[in-house]
Structure formats: structure tokens, C-alpha cells
Image: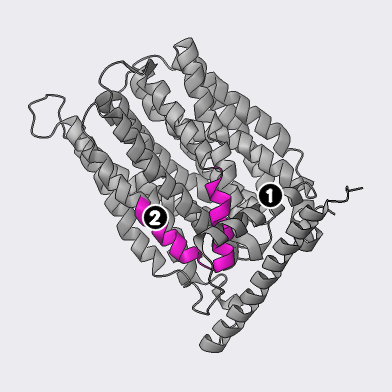
Amino acid sequence: MAETPGRGVADERERVIRIDRSDRSQRTRRSASLAAHTGEDDLTVKNDKRTIFGWAMYDWANSAYITIFGAVVGAFFTGTIMPGDTYWGLSGEALFSILVGIGSILLLIAMPVLGAMADYSDSKKSMLRNFAFVGALFALVIPFVPDGAVGWFLLVVVVSQFGFVAANVFYDGFLPDITTDDTIDRVSSKGFALGYLGGGLYLALALVLIMFSSDEPDATLTEALAARIAIFGSGLWWFGFSLFSLARLPDDSDVPTAKQSVRQYARIGFDRTKRTVVKLRHFPQLLIFIVAFILYNSGTGTVIAVSGPYAEDTLDLSITIIGLAFLLVQFIAFAGALMFGWISDRIGPKRAIMITLVVWTLLAGAAYFIPEGSAAGFLALASVVGFVLGGVQALSRSLYGTMIPEEASAEFFGFFSVFSKLSGIGPLVFGLVSATTGSGRTAILSVAFFFIAGLILLSRVDVDAGRASRADWNFENVGS
């Protein structure tokens, strides 16, 4: 039996309920107005081929940046920006990993609020555009940071990463709007597949440039300069293809809504976020999935974030070899995302994800034993990583999308992004273990824990019950 709230809490709850009722009323008027203007039903947006292709192409756009971030930026930081073997008493590998972890955790507050604000103001497209452009702009700035400017480099990278993550909240929020339950897995997989293909294609072009560079300091094209050009080009790619994607996504409604100040929008966002957190206690299947996702995504996030620095710092491999490994990951992940979409249709997304987690656990153990300087071992491991990476990412997003209320998709995908940022604890743990033990090999074993714990929890999720519970999302009953 729930406790009777105090008068102040009851008043606050009633105020929030009035906000939500006003929000739903505005949505109804906007939908009716849109239908009157276009003569079409709102369902025509769902499963529209042109819209889905445009949506998936944003994955193509930003994947060039995130691929270069994993393959080049980390190794470029440890090999060029770092003035020596250590800075602030930390190795480049440990410092970069800790930065990624702390940056992820700092995004926890912003992401669900942005998602809730996008739902309330019906501004997913404009929010996507704004944050994508901020991220791309700072990606263009990264290569102009001079050698040795560690603090400036880390700051610019954090801002660019913020734009990347924030934009993805609104990108993911479109998924339930443009699909139905029977197509969401395939469309989600298509987005990831195009992302791997686009990121892989750009990485191949960048790798050609890096391969023609030289380690000689007086060369016309040094390896450091080639890395700077590759990073700059990823920002251009992100910006240009974002324009293509945005042109094919549904426009934000032009029906007037109640004007709010930034402070009021923030209050609404926090109110809705708090209510959703409270309600999660009443939906155990979704909550268990969220915790499982936090754990196993900590593992995948760590692999993506630290592979470059680990290969350069611990395995003593060149940027060229690291780039080749990430190129393998990109193109194999393209096939992996599509294949696991096919597998999911036959055995269900939960079982398909569990298969990938078993493989991920084995991979974490195998990474510990790769000998220093073994390019072949690193490339072989990258091939297997690519296969399971596409499956676990695409199916996790689509499985989550089938268990959340469609009318608050941006808000709940804001939470999805929060889960991703909570997963930043993986790189943080890796960095702390590396700094404490002085060994990246010991740190890489910590990744296996996240996969095993996530696998155990995921096995307890009742997907059918979680999907059925969507009909019970009723904001007036918070806390009842």
C-alpha cells in the first residue's frame, strides 16, 4: 500500500498532471491540424520508405565521426597530443578512458530532460538538427588543437561528444513514430547497418590517407597530419549527410503551442523525468531490462572507447593497424546487424542479444592474451567484435522501443540515452583499474564482469509482459 503523500507533494503532482493533460490536448490539436492540411492520416508517416531511409541516413552521417573517434582520436591523443608517457600522473590510455567515463556520467542529467522537452514542444527535428550541428562543428575544431594542449583537446572532445549523444536522443525518439511493432526491429537494424556501412566507407578513405603518410618529422604528410585531416573530414561528413537526413524526416508541427521560457521547459522536463522514474518501479520488466542494458552496454561502450588507446599504448600497434581493425569492425558489423535482425525474427530479440553477450564475454578474455605487437591477433579479435556489435546495439534499441509508450518516445529515448551514459562507468572502471595496476591487460578483464551480469539479468526479462504493460502507462496514477 502506497503511503499518502503530503499536501505539498500532492499539489506538485496535480500541477504536473495538468501539464501532461495540456500536452496531450496540444498533441491532439496538432495532429488534427496536420491531417487537415495534408489530407492524410498520421499513420501514413509510419513505415514510409522515404522517411525510413532518411532516418537511417543520420546513422550514416554521424558514424563517420564516431568511427574516427574510436579508431583515430584516442590513438592520436596518446601518440601525438600527450607530451610524454604520463600527464597528471596518468598514462594516456588511463586518462582518455577516465575522460570518456566522467563525460558520460556528466550527461546523465541533461539527456532525459532534453527528451521530455522535445516531446512537450514537438521539436524532435529541430533538436536533432541543433545538437548534430554543434557536435559536427566541434569535431571540425579537434584537429586544430596543438600538440601538448591536453586540457583544450579534452574539452573540445567532450563538447563534440555531447552534441553527438544529445542528437541521438532525438534521432532514436523518431523510431516509434515511423515504425510499427512488426517493423521496428528491422528498421532499427537498418539504421545501424547503414551507420556501419557509412562509417566504414569513410574510415577506408581516411585509412588510405594515413597509409600514405610517414613517421618522418620532415615529411610533407606526417602520420599526425593525416590523422588531423581524417578527424576534420569526419566532421564535414557528419554535417553534410545530416542535411540530407533532415530533409527527409517529418517536420516539427507548425501548429502554435503554449510558449514557455527555457526555465519553464526545464521545469517541465524535470517534472516528467521524475514522474517516469517513479513509474518505472511499477513496471518491473522494463526496469530489469534497463538495469541489464546498463551493465552489458558498459562492456560494449568500454570496448568501443578504449580499443584505440589500448592498442596503441598496451599492444604498441600503429594507427594504421588500429584503423584496419576498426574498418573490419564497420563492415562486418553491417552484416552482423542485418543477420541478427534476421535471427531476431526467428528466436526473438532477447535470445539473440543473449547470444551476443556470451560471445562478448569470451572476447574480453581473449583480449587479455593478445601478445604485444600482434597485429594479426588484434585484427582477428576485431572481426568477431564487428559481428556481435551490430547485433547487440540494434536489437537493444528496438527491444526497448517495443516496451515504451509511443506518445512519449523522445522522453523515454532520453532515458535510453541516460542508460548509455550510466554505461560510461565501464570506461571509468577500465581507466581506474589501469591507473591502479599500471596494466591495461588487467583492466580489460574487468569488461567481462559487465557482460556476465547483464546476461544474467536479461535472462529474467519477460518481454511479452513488458510490451503489454505499455497500455498501463497513465501519468495520473503515478505512485498509486
Judge left or right: residue 129 versus residue 182. Answer: left
Nearer to us in this view, 125 or 300:
125
Give the magenta range: 108-134
Nearer to us in this view, 272 or 288:
272
Q: Find residue 173 and report its horizontal and vertical position in percent.
A: 55, 59
- Distance between the Cα atoms at labels 2 and 1? 33 Å
Residue lying at the far right of the rendered structure:
1
Instruction: Determine if the magenta segment contains residue 62.
Output: no
Which residue in the structure is indicated by mark 1? 348
- The amino acid pointed to by label 1 is Gly
Residue lying at the far top of the rendered structure:
437
Residue 252 versus residue 319 in the image, above or below = below
Q: Find residue 346 and report its horizontal and vertical position in percent.
A: 67, 51
Instruction: Determine if the magenta segment contains residue 117.
Output: yes
* Residue at image coords 43%, 30%: 99
The kind of secondary structure the magenta stretch mainly shows is helix
- The amino acid pointed to by label 2 is Ala
Which residue in the structure is indicated by mark 2? 132
- The quadrant of the image that shows the C terminus is bottom right
Which of pointers 2 and 1 lies earlier in the amino acid sequence? 2
